[in-house]
Image: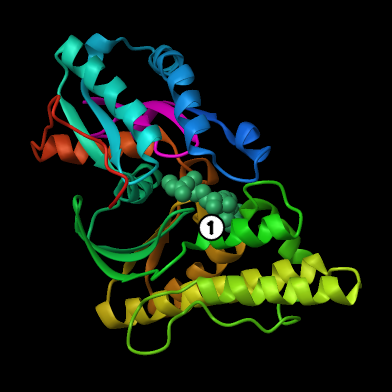
Amino acid sequence: MLILGMESSCDETSVAVVDGETRKILSNIVASQIDVHRLYGGVVPEIASRAHIEAISNITYRALDEAGVTLADIGAVAVTANPGLIGALLVGVNFAKSLAYSRRIPLVAVNHVKAHAAAAYLTDPALEPPFLALIVSGGHTSIFEVTDHRTFNTIGCTRDDAAGEAFDKIGRVIGMPYPGGAALDKLAYEGDPNAIKLPSPALAGDNLDFSFSGIKTAALNYINAEKMKGGELKVADIAASYTHAVVDALAKKCDIALGRTGHKRMVLAGGVAANSHLRAAIEKVCKKHGATLTVPPISLCGDNAAMVAQAGYFEYAAGVFVGTELNASAND
Ligand code: KG4
Ligand code: ZN
């Protein structure tokens, strides 16, 4: 059963064709707007919406072409309906609704965070719930107990900013181009992870929650104080210490979560799952608990429509369809 997936929640326009039953990707076209937003140091929502409008039709034809199929072969259209930038989401949702309605193709709505987790099913076609999932992206940091393909119970989450946003913020301050996450990842290898003492984003107490506002402020204060002293900023030490503190906190809560729930399967997904330090740390925690870890390849960690299509397949399989009344929502 072929699913046409569509993603436009932030700064990537993406359309993919996926065989939901076999979890095989036939095409996955991702048009990134990063070069445009980089000029402003972050995503400009209005520019994102306009760029999605310009790209989506063309990208859809390309995805069908690359898969070697036509709309007649598509069993369902799956679109990210929430959460995300509202104007950006509306472009994908309205395009998908029009396409589905005009061609009489069933339409399913997909939650972007659940879609990130679905990248794991494309990575390991044999993967089945239950499992624990750490989803870390520019907008989300959550630990879920995934009990079936569509049921996600939140057992931990950030109380304020997301891990990706925290990486991007510090990246920008030390001169990395937007988004700073990937650049910080590399730079961290050149610095001392214990050079700068930073507060842990792992909240104290009997919970699985995070807070990234404290570490962001502490790092900014450190950088400003160093600048005022007039010395050269040790950017590699900042990258290493900051990455160490963030990764350590995520790994610590996953360690507790695996111990508490007894799950023997774990999924790490979302844009920040591309972080090499985080991948290694979660792998280590899983080993400790005798749990198997599924982490998508880098190409499926960031926003893409193949993961949306796979998540959409589970909606289709459950018979959960939507019609032209579908609206986008900025919230979870
Ligand atoms: O999932 P995603 O593409 O978009 C959202 O749903 O938010 O995640 C984007 C985030 C950005 O904050 C970016 O800096 C971060 O993922 N990211 C990384 C790495 N690659 C991308 N963060 C840390 N290390 C990386 N290697
Ligand atoms: Zn995302």
Direction left: furthest residue: 319
x, y percent for residue 40? 65, 41
Q: Pick the residue in front: 77 or 8.
A: 8
Residue 284 vs 205, above or below: the answer is above
109 displayed left or right of 92: left
Secondary element type, mark 1: helix
Is residue 275 visible in the rendered image? The answer is: no
Residue 287 sits inside the magenta stretch: no
Q: Pick the residue in front: 40 or 192.
A: 40
**Residue at image coords 54%, 39%:** 44
- Magenta span: predominant SS is strand
x, y percent for residue 197? 68, 84
202 displayed left or right of 191: left
**Residue at image coords 39%, 38%:** 9
Q: Quadrant of the N terminus?
A: top left
Residue 18 sits inside the magenta stretch: yes
The magenta segment is: 1-28
x, y percent for residue 282? 48, 69
Residue denoted by label 1 = 165
Residue 297 vs 12, above or below: the answer is below
Direction bottom: furthest residue: 205
Q: Pick the residue in front: 184 or 93.
A: 93
**Ligand 1 is within 8 Å of the C-beta of the residue at disc 1:** yes
